[in-house]
């Protein structure tokens, strides 16, 4: 009984609490520029037009590294992507994957914003600053950015620089993330569950359309009750799952029918990676081409595709202090740049043939 009375009842398993600069301070140091703002506004408007059917011609393409661990290599990739995408702008609305947070099944590297030095020191202050700085530079190229939002505080630091946000397969069922999505200022894609089931993504779309009140932080870093009006710009992302791929015509038609009550013209994006490629990056190209066959046949509801791509194909193992090969993923394996450019051109040609 005496041991229980002396037992610590708060912070028992904590090893530290490090204050983080408030969002307003970081934005003051790295303010959005007119060029970056124009890119964000145009990026978001283009996606909204696609989702709601005001643009029935183009495809939305979310393409880029599985995760960013090297900002310099990511900027190199962004410059190549912008140069390739610009001539295809009448057929494709291209947005770069800029993923800084990684959900882990058990343990592992959690992303640039959590561990920018790749050494386990978890310098979050520096990580968020690097993420914001990179987003600024990519947007200033005229290339919109997309990211998965995992930590509910992160949007206050970087969301003004994102044109599209993903709620991942592991978090689509989370009420916290559904509420978060209801207040975001950009379109949001909800992935189907890891088992391949679409119901959780559909329910997330419904929840995010409605108003919510939840706990968050202000721009000055103070705890607050956040109230939202609901986000009208939502869609589902078919990424396959443990039950197998779901990028075929029947699965797309089923998804379109299941979310029909949301009254969205093009609510179905197909992720060419993850379960749809059976976690084999070399199958992303074949998956993409199968979806392009459906695009040429004018299959209803298709918004676009997501592809995991990097400067070089494949991936590499990571451990703290290890020398890494430039442009190679340290998380999911990606296709390389040459294949990426080829697929983008094939997508544009398919859109031309469809219309």
Image: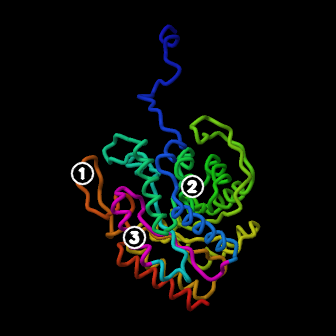
Crowd band around label 3 with a 10 angstrom C-alpha radius: few (<14), some (14–19), many (20+): some
> Are the residues flagged by discs 3 and 1 in contact, CB closer than 8 Å?
no
Structural distance between the alpha carbons of marks 3 and 1: 27 Å
Tell me where residue 21 appears, x and y as whole percent.
48, 38
Q: Under tag 1, what secondary structure? A: loop
Mark 3 vs mark 1, foreground winner is 3
The residue that mark 2 highlights is 160
Query: Which mark lies nearer to you, 1 or 2?
Result: 2
Residue at far front of view: 34
Estimate how packed mark 2 is, as few (under 14), some (14 to 19) or many (20 or more) residues with alpha carbons within 10 Å. Answer: many
Sequence-first tag of 1 and 2: 2
In magenta stretch: residue 74: yes
Residue at the image position 36 percent from the left and 55 percent from the top: 69
**Which residue is nearer to you in this view: 179 or 220?**
220
Residue 270 drawn in magenta: no
Residue 37: % across, % down: 56, 61
Residue that extends furthest to the top in the rendered view of this protein: 2
Identify the image quadrant of the C terminus. bottom right
Q: Residue placed at 35% from the left, 61% from the top?
A: 329
Q: Looking at the picture, does residue 352 appear above or below residue 269?
A: below
Q: Position of residue 20 (x, y in %)?
A: 48, 37
Relative vertical location of residue 226 with respect to residue 304 in this rendering, above or below: above
Q: Identify the residue position indicated by label 3 in the image.
A: 79
Magenta highlight range: 55-84
Measured in 3D between alpha carbons, the distance from the residue under mark 2 to the one under mark 3, in whole angstroms, is 21 Å
Q: Is residue 350 left or right of residue 211?
A: left
């Amino acid at each position: 009984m005496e041991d229980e009375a002396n037992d610590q009842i708060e912070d028992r398993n904590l090893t530290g609490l490090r204050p983080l600069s408030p969002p307003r301070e970081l934005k003051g140091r790295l303010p959005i520029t007119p060029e970056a703002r124009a890119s964000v506004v145009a990026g978001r408007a283009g996606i909204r037009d696609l989702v709601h059917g005001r643009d029935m011609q183009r495809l939305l393409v979310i393409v880029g590294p599985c995760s960013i661990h090297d900002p310099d290599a990511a900027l190199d990739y962004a410059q190549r992507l912008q140069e390739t995408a610009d001539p295809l702008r009448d057929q494709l609305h291209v947005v770069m994957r800029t993923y800084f947070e990684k959900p882990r099944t058990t343990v592992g590297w959690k992303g640039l914003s959590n561990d920018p030095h790749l050494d386990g020191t978890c310098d979050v202050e520096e990580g968020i600053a690097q993420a914001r700085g990179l987003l600024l530079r990519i947007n200033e190229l005229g290339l919109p950015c997309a990211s998965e939002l995992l930590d509910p505080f992160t949007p206050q630091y970087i969301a003004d620089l994102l044109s599209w946000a993903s709620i991942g397969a592991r978090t689509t069922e989370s009420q916290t993330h559904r509420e978060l999505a209801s207040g975001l200022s950009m379109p949001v894609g909800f992935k189907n569950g890891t088992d391949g089931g679409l119901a959780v993504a559909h329910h997330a779309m419904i929840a995010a359309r409605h108003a919510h009140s939840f706990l968050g932080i202000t721009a000055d870093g103070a705890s607050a009750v956040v109230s939202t009006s609901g986000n009208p710009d939502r869609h589902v992302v078919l990424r396959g799952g443990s039950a197998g791929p779901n990028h075929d015509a029947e699965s797309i038609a089923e998804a379109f029918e299941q979310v029909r009550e949301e009254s969205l013209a093009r609510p179905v994006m197909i992720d060419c990676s993850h379960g749809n490629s059976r976690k084999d990056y070399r199958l992303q190209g074949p998956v993409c081409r199968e979806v392009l066959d459906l695009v040429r046949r004018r299959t209803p509801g298709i918004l676009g595709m997501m592809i995991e791509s990097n400067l070089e194909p494949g991936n590499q193992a990571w451990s703290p202090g290890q020398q890494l090969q430039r442009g190679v993923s340290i998380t999911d394996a990606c296709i390389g740049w040459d294949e990426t450019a080829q697929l983008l051109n094939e997508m544009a040609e398919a859109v031309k043939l469809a219309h």
